[in-house]
Image (tube, rainbow, N blue to C red):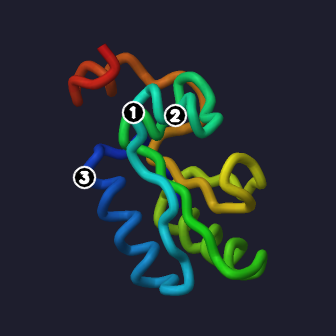
Amino acid sequence: MKRHPMTPVEFDAACRLLVRECPWLWETSGYRGVAHNEDVGGVPGSKHVLGIARDFCAKDQAGLDQGGEVALRLGLWILVHDVGSGNHLHCQGLPVGPVPRWWMNKYQVGG
């Protein structure tokens, strides 16, 4: 599937499908305010601050890897990494890097 920047609604729908198809995943982080993002060691410019990123955990690496495969099929950008809250599947509805200005203007986020 070719990925495209998701709307907030598309992102939410993709995450709901992810947990429906992968019931062994549980969400550990979604939207974070700027202060909370800093407190948990989130990077500046984190997609969590825009509400377009979520983290999921599983009981083992195989569950994370399998969840990552499903997330990619659903058009999400992913990273499985061990930072902050431990090993988890990070999913976001926008590509890595700066958020496109058109996206921020359209959804009136980010100032």
Residue that appears at 46% across and 27% down:
35
Residue closer to the observer: 98 or 60: 60
Furthest-front residue in view? 39
Residue closer to the observer: 19 or 101: 19
Residue 45: horizontal and vertical position, in percent? Answer: 53, 24
Residue that appears at 48% across and 66% down:
27
- Where is the C terminus found, in terms of image quarters? top left
Residue that appears at 75% across and 80% down:
60
Q: CA distance from mark 3 to mark 2?
A: 22 Å
Lower position in the chain sequence, tag 1 or tag 3: 3
Q: Is residue 84 left or right of residue 42?
A: right
Residue 19: which quarter of the image? bottom left
Asked if the residue under mark 3 is in contact with the one under mark 1, i.e. CB atoms within 8 Å, the reply is no
Name the element at disc 2.
helix
In the image, which disc is placed on residue 9? 3
Q: CA distance from mark 1 to mark 2?
A: 6 Å
Name the element at disc 1.
loop
Residue 84: horizontal and vertical position, in percent? Answer: 69, 47
Name the element at disc 3.
helix
Residue 33: which quarter of the image? top left
Instruction: Give amino acid for label 3.
Output: Val
The residue to which callout 1 is attached is 33
Vertical comparison of 89 with 31: above or below: below
Instruction: Give amino acid for label 2.
Output: Asn
In the image, which disc is placed on residue 37? 2
Instruction: Give amino acid for label 1.
Output: Gly
Asked if the residue under mark 2 is in contact with the one under mark 3, i.e. CB atoms within 8 Å, the reply is no
Asked if the residue under mark 2 is in contact with the one under mark 1, i.e. CB atoms within 8 Å, the reply is yes
Q: CA distance from mark 1 to mark 3?
A: 19 Å
